[in-house]
Image (cartoon, coloured by chain):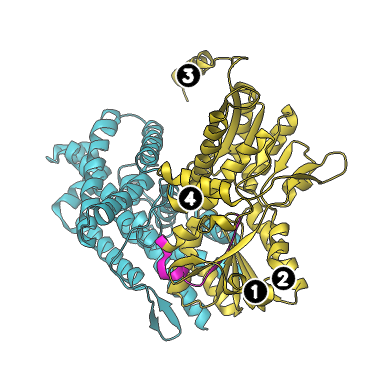
Chain colours: A cyan, B yellow
Amino acid sequence: MAELLQHLLNGLVLGGTYALLGIGLTLIFGLMNVVNFAHGEFYTLGAYVSFAALALAGAGFFVALLAAIVVGAALGWLCEVALLRPLRNESIDTTMLVMIGVWIAMQNAELLGWGGVAKSIPHPFPTAPLVLGPVAIAPLRLFVLVLAAGLIAAAWLLVQKTKLGRAMRATFQDRDTAALMGVGIGRIHAATFAFGSALAAAAGALLGPIFLVYPSMGDLASLKAFSVVILGGLGNLPGATLGGLLLGIAEELGAGYISSGYRDAAGFVIIILVLLFRPSGLFARQERIA
Amino acid sequence: MGKRSIVLVALVLVALAALTVPGHPQSPIRIGVIEPLSGPVAASGNYVRMGAEIARDWINAKGGIAGRKVDLLIEDNKSDPKEAASAAEKLIVRDKVPAIMGAWGSSMTLAAMPKLEEYGVPMVVETSSAASITKRGNPWIFRISPPSEMEALGLEQYVDKLGVKRVDFLAVNTDWGRGSISAFGDRLKKKGAVVGVAEFMDQSATDMNAQITKIKAAGGDTLFLTTAVEQITLVMKQAQEQRLTRKIVTTGGSSSPTQLIKQAGAAAEGSYHIVFFMPWFPESMPDGKLARAFVDEWAKRGHPFEGLTEGFRGHDGIAMWKVSLMGVNGPIKFEKDGPAGKESGQSKPSIFVVQIRDGKVALPDFLAKK
């Protein structure tokens, strides 16, 4: 029983990190229809910015997180304006190829700048675990879980409740009508991409201290983020959150009770089942039209 | 893909072909090196490269081999077996190297091996531990690193002193990790230890909590951990988070204890590590003077100290071409291994055990007393 509780807690913590990765991508992939293969690179970028701020410049944990968000948003904005804007009327394949290029360029730039050796980000939390009855959790992990929940809630509020969020949803539902209603289309595209990228960078800054920071860390993150988005349904923030938790718990229980060699398989089996039986995502309320 | 993309691809291919320059016959001896310079095990690959460069410079400073300078052609296998095979093909076909050193991971080495047989080019295996590498009957393979069986045999004498009674395994899900579990499992069973669970992790996995929870429930006294230093760091940190209290023994020699002390801190305390080079006490190596010179040269070049336990492999893998058979690890001498008539060469390297104690690397008590 204690083992099952620990597995569930591990799954929840892991799922929280997947959800954090997924919400940024679901905005870009789901709303903007850009297959953003560079999402994981923004995650890596956030981790390196946080490393530079904490380990090299001696800044505090929150300053480092803020720096990662700002740099991620700025680079995301630049990426949209310089690369995606000229291709707005091209097909989804064209932008996908461009994003694959961005992915390769960013990863190799990181390799060139930082070298391949993994870096460890120092953090101010005690390393001794918090013991809650039969289970244990590291204080840093708990903190990251809470902060991730906060970021997810903030993202949801922004998209659902603010004027900017309404403009975003309107733009990606029907661009021409939104433009006729006076929405600045160019600004909304750039803002959405910057927002999604900033969320990825925040995830990197939060998860960097838990794991290690190295140039190819974004590959696994991208893979998980796409899985979460497919599970939750494109553009669906609560769906991405639940999808992340589901994926985390499925992997954890798959590794715990079936075989750790097939850990990732457990997650992908669920995705295949979802694609077979609910192709628009587990939590999509109805089929999207057009 | 439209017509335009096909034209573009054709243009790129033509441009690449134009860039290919045939090798000059009178140029230096060019030895190919295939290492993981990027990807999840990049640290180790880069350290091996640094060691290889030291050997190259030392050989050249002494006049080279048969009056010809040695040149290294270094290819990145990206920690990926597919890339290792294509790197071997590129080095052999395009660069026409007479010999190769590589490819760090067992899965990468195994993937590159058919190319060696196809083109008849020898490769020195400097790191890989899987038994199958020298057992497959590939006569172009010369291994200077110990296979897991040899490591397990080397550890056998310490099993009682380590107090190993009930052992669990956690290994990277590659030929190296799987081979290591069966080699150490067999040897420990013969010594009367009970083997509990054997858990695996993907090479790029970062969260090993599920495996650790399972290992904790299995209730052994010792955990044998086989992977590269990056994952060892994560496993040790996560084991500490889950209050997993047991002896940890790492195998394969890629644990870099100094890096563990830096990155895992208290979580690495008390752990034992099988290593093939002890840069902390170079005098204890078979050739103390050579080991000391290598450590000094490494420091002079500004390479990080933690890379030495991996970097010596690069030196020995390149230096052995100069017939002088003393490596930093000890003497290198090949014996036949594998199916008759198609044997690979296998050297018997020195194996050592060190412990992390009070934040420092030390000889375990049972060795220090000797």
User: Mark 3 and mark 1: span between their CA atoms?
Assistant: 55 Å
Q: In which quarter of the image is residue B24?
A: top right
Circles 3 and 4, Cβ within 8 Å, touching? The answer is no
Tags 2 and 3 on a common chain: yes
**Amino acid beneath label 4:** Gly
Q: Are marks 3 and 1 on the same chain?
A: yes
Q: How packed is label 3: few (under 14 Cα within 10 Å), some, or many (20 or more)?
A: few
Chain identifier of the residue bearing label 3 in the image: B
The residue where tag 2 is placed is B188
The earlier-in-sequence mark between 4 and 1 is 1
Local SS, label 3? helix
Q: Which label sits in the foreground, 4 or 1?
A: 4
Mark 3 vs mark 4, CA separation in Å: 38 Å
Mark number, residue B307: 4
Drawn side of residue B182 relative to residue B266, left or right: right
- Mark 3 or 1 closer to N-term? 3
- Give the number of the disc on residue A273: none
Report the Cα–Cα distance between label 2 and label 4: 30 Å
- Label 2, label 3: how far apart the Cα atoms are: 55 Å
* Residues at marks 3 and 4 on the same chain: yes
Query: Marks 4 and 1, how far apart in space?
Result: 29 Å
The label shown at residue B12 is 3
Pair 3/4: label in front? 4
* Alpha carbon separation for disc pair 1 and 2: 8 Å
- Point out residue A222 in the picture as x, y percentages from the top left corner: 42, 49
Which amino acid type is shown beneath numbered disc 2? Leu
Query: Is-magenta flag for residue B268?
Result: yes
Residues in magenta, as a range: B262-276
Residue on which disc 1 sits: B167
Kindly give the residue lying farthest to the front in the view shown. B289
Q: Where is residue B15 in the image (x, y as percent from the top left)?
A: 48, 15
